[in-house]
Image (cartoon, rainbow, N blue to C red):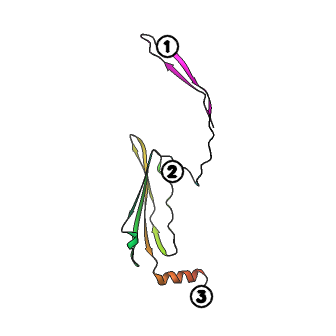
Amino acid sequence: MTIGPVTHHLTKAEGMTRPTFDVVAGAVTLTVAPYPGAGRPLAARHFTVQDEFSKDPAELREGETLTRRITLTAEGTMAHLLPARPEIREPWLISFTAPEIRETRLTAEGPSPSRSGNGACAPIPARSARSCRSSSRGSTR
Protein backbone atom coordinates (compact mmCIF):
# COMPACT_ATOMS: atom_id res chain seq x y z
CA MET A 1 0.00 0.00 0.00
CA THR A 2 1.36 3.42 -0.91
CA ILE A 3 0.39 6.59 0.96
CA GLY A 4 1.22 10.02 -0.45
CA PRO A 5 2.80 12.14 -1.53
CA VAL A 6 1.07 14.66 0.72
CA THR A 7 1.31 18.43 0.41
CA HIS A 8 0.51 20.68 3.39
CA HIS A 9 -0.08 24.38 2.63
CA LEU A 10 1.52 26.10 5.63
CA THR A 11 0.94 29.72 6.58
CA LYS A 12 3.63 31.13 8.84
CA ALA A 13 3.13 34.25 10.96
CA GLU A 14 6.19 36.53 10.77
CA GLY A 15 5.40 39.84 12.43
CA MET A 16 2.86 41.61 10.22
CA THR A 17 3.32 39.23 7.26
CA ARG A 18 1.94 35.75 6.65
CA PRO A 19 4.05 33.98 4.03
CA THR A 20 2.79 30.60 2.76
CA PHE A 21 4.89 27.53 2.06
CA ASP A 22 4.17 24.11 0.64
CA VAL A 23 5.56 21.33 2.83
CA VAL A 24 5.74 18.06 0.87
CA ALA A 25 6.02 14.58 2.35
CA GLY A 26 7.08 11.98 -0.17
CA ALA A 27 5.24 8.76 -0.84
CA VAL A 28 5.65 5.92 1.67
CA THR A 29 5.06 2.30 0.71
CA LEU A 30 4.01 -0.19 3.39
CA THR A 31 3.62 -3.95 3.15
CA VAL A 32 0.32 -4.95 4.75
CA ALA A 33 -0.39 -8.60 5.57
CA PRO A 34 -3.95 -9.90 5.13
CA TYR A 35 -6.18 -10.01 8.23
CA PRO A 36 -5.27 -13.30 9.97
CA GLY A 37 -8.70 -14.12 11.40
CA ALA A 38 -11.98 -15.27 9.97
CA GLY A 39 -14.66 -12.68 9.40
CA ARG A 40 -14.34 -8.93 9.53
CA PRO A 41 -11.81 -7.23 11.85
CA LEU A 42 -13.19 -4.92 14.52
CA ALA A 43 -11.52 -1.56 14.99
CA ALA A 44 -12.55 0.35 18.12
CA ARG A 45 -11.04 2.91 20.44
CA HIS A 46 -12.13 0.98 23.56
CA PHE A 47 -13.73 -2.48 23.76
CA THR A 48 -15.41 -4.10 26.77
CA VAL A 49 -17.17 -7.42 27.33
CA GLN A 50 -19.58 -7.85 30.23
CA ASP A 51 -20.61 -11.45 30.95
CA GLU A 52 -23.29 -11.95 33.62
CA PHE A 53 -24.85 -15.17 34.95
CA SER A 54 -28.04 -15.49 37.00
CA LYS A 55 -26.18 -17.98 39.23
CA ASP A 56 -22.84 -19.77 39.40
CA PRO A 57 -22.77 -22.25 36.45
CA ALA A 58 -20.76 -24.73 38.56
CA GLU A 59 -23.73 -25.00 40.96
CA LEU A 60 -26.39 -25.62 38.30
CA ARG A 61 -28.49 -28.65 39.18
CA GLU A 62 -30.73 -30.82 37.04
CA GLY A 63 -34.01 -29.02 36.33
CA GLU A 64 -32.55 -25.55 37.02
CA THR A 65 -32.16 -22.86 34.35
CA LEU A 66 -29.27 -20.46 34.04
CA THR A 67 -29.63 -17.09 32.33
CA ARG A 68 -26.56 -15.54 30.73
CA ARG A 69 -26.30 -11.97 29.42
CA ILE A 70 -23.34 -10.89 27.30
CA THR A 71 -22.90 -7.20 26.46
CA LEU A 72 -20.23 -5.88 24.09
CA THR A 73 -19.42 -2.17 23.96
CA ALA A 74 -16.96 -0.74 21.44
CA GLU A 75 -16.33 3.00 21.35
CA GLY A 76 -15.58 4.53 17.97
CA THR A 77 -17.40 2.08 15.68
CA MET A 78 -21.01 1.24 14.76
CA ALA A 79 -23.34 -1.42 16.19
CA HIS A 80 -23.73 -3.31 12.90
CA LEU A 81 -19.94 -3.92 12.87
CA LEU A 82 -19.89 -5.73 16.23
CA PRO A 83 -19.41 -9.50 15.97
CA ALA A 84 -22.40 -11.82 16.08
CA ARG A 85 -23.31 -13.66 19.25
CA PRO A 86 -21.77 -17.14 19.38
CA GLU A 87 -24.11 -20.10 19.33
CA ILE A 88 -24.09 -22.20 22.50
CA ARG A 89 -24.81 -25.77 21.47
CA GLU A 90 -23.91 -28.91 23.39
CA PRO A 91 -25.55 -32.36 23.30
CA TRP A 92 -26.17 -32.20 27.08
CA LEU A 93 -27.65 -28.67 27.07
CA ILE A 94 -31.01 -27.13 26.21
CA SER A 95 -30.47 -23.50 25.20
CA PHE A 96 -32.81 -20.68 24.21
CA THR A 97 -31.59 -17.30 23.00
CA ALA A 98 -33.58 -14.10 22.79
CA PRO A 99 -33.00 -11.77 19.83
CA GLU A 100 -29.93 -9.63 20.38
CA ILE A 101 -30.22 -5.89 20.87
CA ARG A 102 -27.88 -3.60 18.94
CA GLU A 103 -27.81 0.12 19.53
CA THR A 104 -25.47 3.04 18.89
CA ARG A 105 -25.38 5.99 21.29
CA LEU A 106 -23.92 9.18 19.84
CA THR A 107 -21.53 10.90 22.24
CA ALA A 108 -19.21 13.92 22.04
CA GLU A 109 -16.32 11.47 21.57
CA GLY A 110 -18.06 9.66 18.71
CA PRO A 111 -20.36 6.64 18.36
CA SER A 112 -20.59 4.18 21.25
CA PRO A 113 -22.37 1.01 20.12
CA SER A 114 -23.38 -1.99 22.18
CA ARG A 115 -24.72 -5.45 21.46
CA SER A 116 -26.42 -7.44 24.18
CA GLY A 117 -28.29 -10.67 24.30
CA ASN A 118 -29.79 -13.05 26.82
CA GLY A 119 -29.72 -16.80 26.68
CA ALA A 120 -31.26 -19.39 28.96
CA CYS A 121 -29.59 -22.77 29.42
CA ALA A 122 -30.55 -25.91 31.28
CA PRO A 123 -28.80 -29.27 31.39
CA ILE A 124 -30.69 -32.13 29.78
CA PRO A 125 -31.70 -34.65 32.44
CA ALA A 126 -29.54 -37.80 32.28
CA ARG A 127 -32.44 -39.99 31.11
CA SER A 128 -33.40 -37.57 28.30
CA ALA A 129 -29.76 -37.22 27.24
CA ARG A 130 -29.51 -41.01 26.83
CA SER A 131 -32.66 -41.13 24.70
CA CYS A 132 -31.41 -38.19 22.58
CA ARG A 133 -28.13 -39.99 21.93
CA SER A 134 -29.96 -43.22 21.09
CA SER A 135 -32.38 -41.55 18.70
CA SER A 136 -29.60 -39.66 16.95
CA ARG A 137 -27.93 -43.00 16.11
CA GLY A 138 -31.12 -44.30 14.52
CA SER A 139 -32.06 -46.69 17.32
CA THR A 140 -35.68 -47.94 17.37
CA ARG A 141 -35.81 -48.81 21.06
The magenta span reads 1-30
Quarter of the picture holding the N terminus = top right
Q: Is residue 88 above or below residue 139?
A: above
> Residue at (47%, 47%) from the top-left corner?
78
| Residue 140: mark | 3
Front label number (2 vs 1): 1
- Image coords of residue 89 (percent x, y): 51, 69
**How much space separates mark 1 and mark 3, taking CA atoms?**
92 Å
CB of mark 1 within 8 Å of CB of mark 3? no
> 106 and 67: which one is in front?
67
Q: Earlier in the sequence, mark 2 or mark 1?
A: 1
Q: Earlier in the sequence, mark 2 or mark 3?
A: 2
* Residue behind mark 1: 19
Quarter of the picture holding the C terminus = bottom right
Q: Secondary structure at mark 1?
A: loop
Give the amino acid at mark 1: Pro
Q: Secondary structure at mark 2?
A: helix
> Residue at (58%, 54%) from the top-left corner?
39
* Residue behind mark 2: 81
**How much space separates mark 2 and mark 1, taking CA atoms?**
46 Å
